[in-house]
Amino acid sequence: SNAEADFFISSSDSIVKHEVTMKLDSVNENGIHLSWTEYTRCRVSGYSIYRANMSTGKFTLLNSVSGNLLNFVDNDFVCPQPFLYYVKPKVSCAKVYPKKSNHVVADPFVSLSQQKMEIVESTAINDSSILTEWRKPSVFPDLILCFDVYRSTDNKKYDFIARVEESGTDYLDRFVDLRNSSYFYKVIPINSCDKIQVKGNYSAKVILSANETDGITKLKWSKHKIWETGVEKYVVEKLNETGTWDVVKEVNANTFEIND
């Protein structure tokens, strides 16, 4: 029979139990490093490494190596997630049925929990809308399908307000009441691995006002209070006739007005 058995049968028909033990050596940026003990009951032509997604438990053949190798590095995964492994010897002896090894669990070095967003700013536009801008995560950016935008008026309860395509880096919120409410925003990347990511930093609107006297426009704005690391500087920009923004002036974090 070619069925898998837990025992090897010697030439004298005595039954001896055998074992190959797999272990996790290390996990780093190069992948998951696995090794196993040598199968000594018969000449080995190779070893087959099997892997299962922890969420399904279904094993598939990952790779095969020659019989003189006792280690393997797995870096063949798109979605970082916990994996389950075992190894099984391939032998060329008659009436020898090697069993699979023990199971080993491993997590990739980089996980999608590090796929955090960095919101650059939220700025009031013409006292009627708020533009929120962000930078894409540097961790697995190719896995991002879209971005979900959430808004709050108390920085506690956030409601979903929009979904932005994966190429987008900003969202214009037109449904705001800037005179009577404060607004806070967060952006969460949605990826092809179907994992909701840890939220990044928050953003709050900066209220900008303008008053003109004797041909001089005085611009004033509110202090940004949300970012834990503080504000490095404020950049004042002006929309030109082509629809793009030109930098008017950059000021330090303690300056809240300029004359244009």
Image: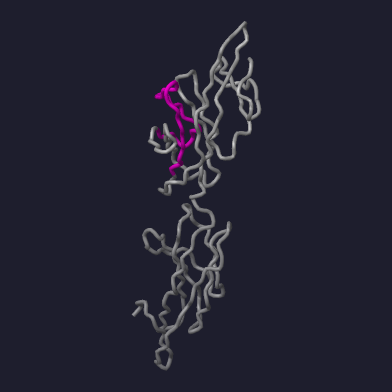
Q: Is residue 112 above or below residue 46?
A: above
Q: Nearer the viewer, residue 128 or 48?
A: 128
Q: Residue at x 39, y 64 (%)?
A: 59
Quadrant that contains the C terminus: top right
Say left or right for 155 vs 218. Answer: left
Q: Is residue 165 above or below residue 37?
A: above
- Percent across and percent down for residue 12 are 42, 94
Q: Nearer the viewer, residue 116 or 192?
A: 116
Q: In the rendered structure, which segment of residues is drawn in magenta?
A: 162-190
- Percent across and percent down for residue 23 are 51, 71
Please say whether residue 168 is one of the residues in the magenta stretch.
yes
Quadrant that contains the N terminus: bottom left
Q: Is residue 86 above or below residue 183?
A: below
- Percent across and percent down for residue 250 are 65, 25
Q: Nearer the viewer, residue 113 or 30?
A: 113
Quarter-of-image position of residue 254 = top right
Colour pattern of the rendering? one colour
Say left or right for 149 vs 134. Answer: left
Q: Residue at x 56, y 28 (%)?
A: 223
Please say whether residue 179 is one of the residues in the magenta stretch.
yes
Residue furthest to the bottom in view is 12
Q: Residue at x 42, y 82 (%)?
A: 96
